[in-house]
Amino acid sequence: MKEKAVEYYLKGGFSCAESILKAAVDEGLCDSSLLPCATTFSGGMSSGCLCGAVASSQIILGYHFGRDNKFNNPVCAREKAAEFVEEFKKRNKVTCCRVLSAGLEGSARKEHCSKLVADCSEILESMVKVKV
C-alpha cells in the first residue's frame, strides 16, 4: 500500500489525502465511493491544521471500526483513532500540516510530505490488516 500511495502522491496528481484513500481502495481496504471525501483534506483541510494524510487514514479506520460498519467489528473506533495518532506522533512529533511542512515549498515540500504519506500508509495498513 505504501508504494502505491507514494506513487499516487508524487506522480499521479493526487493530494496526500487522496493518495492514501486511492491506495486503500486498490488494496481492497475500503470502497471507492470514499475517494471524493478525501479531496477536501489536503493542505490541512485548507486551513493548515490536521495533516490530510492523517485525516484520510481516519476515514478508513472509521470504515473498519466505526459504528455500524460492514465488518460488524466491536472495536472502539476512537481507540483506533488514538492509536493511529500516537504512532504517527512517535514518527513525526505532531499531526498539524502547518507545523509538519513549515518552511518548505514546492518540490521540497512534496518530497517531505511523501514521507508522511508513507508513514500513514504503513500505520494504517498494519492496523487494518491485523483486524481482517
Image (tube, grey):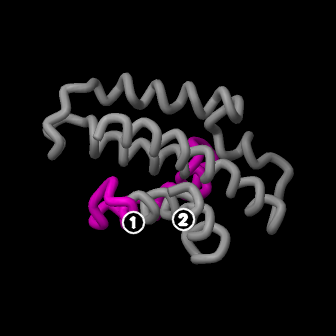
Instruction: Give the distance between the C-alpha atoms of the residues marked 2 and 1, in whole angstroms.
Output: 8 Å
Q: Is residue 29 magenta?
A: yes
Q: Position of residue 34 (x, y in %)?
A: 32, 60
Q: Which residue is at 67% across, 70% downward?
A: 10
Label disc, if present, on residue 4 of the rendered structure: 2
Residue drawn at x 58%, y 76% is: 12
Neighbourhood count class around disc 2 (C-alpha, 10 Å): few under 14, some 14–19, many 20 upward: some
**Residue pointed to by mark 1:** 26
Q: Nearer the viewer, residue 20 or 36?
A: 20
- Tell me which secondary structure the magenta stretch mostly adopts: helix
Where is 6 relative to 76, above or below? below
- Secondary structure beneath dot 2 equals helix
Instruction: Examine the image and state in which quarter residue 93 appears.
Output: top right
Range shown magenta: 25-52
Residue that appears at 28% across and 24% down = 76
Amino acid at circle 2 = Lys
4, 43: nearer the viewer: 4
Is residue 36 toward the left or the right of residue 7 in the image? left
Callout 2 touching callout 1 (CB < 8 Å):
yes
Image position, residue 82 (x, y; %): 46, 25
Residue at 64% over, 29% down: 89
Residue 2 falls inside the magenta stretch: no
Measured along the vertical axis of the image, is residue 81 above or below residue 46? above
> Horizontal placement of 53 versus 115: left or right?
left
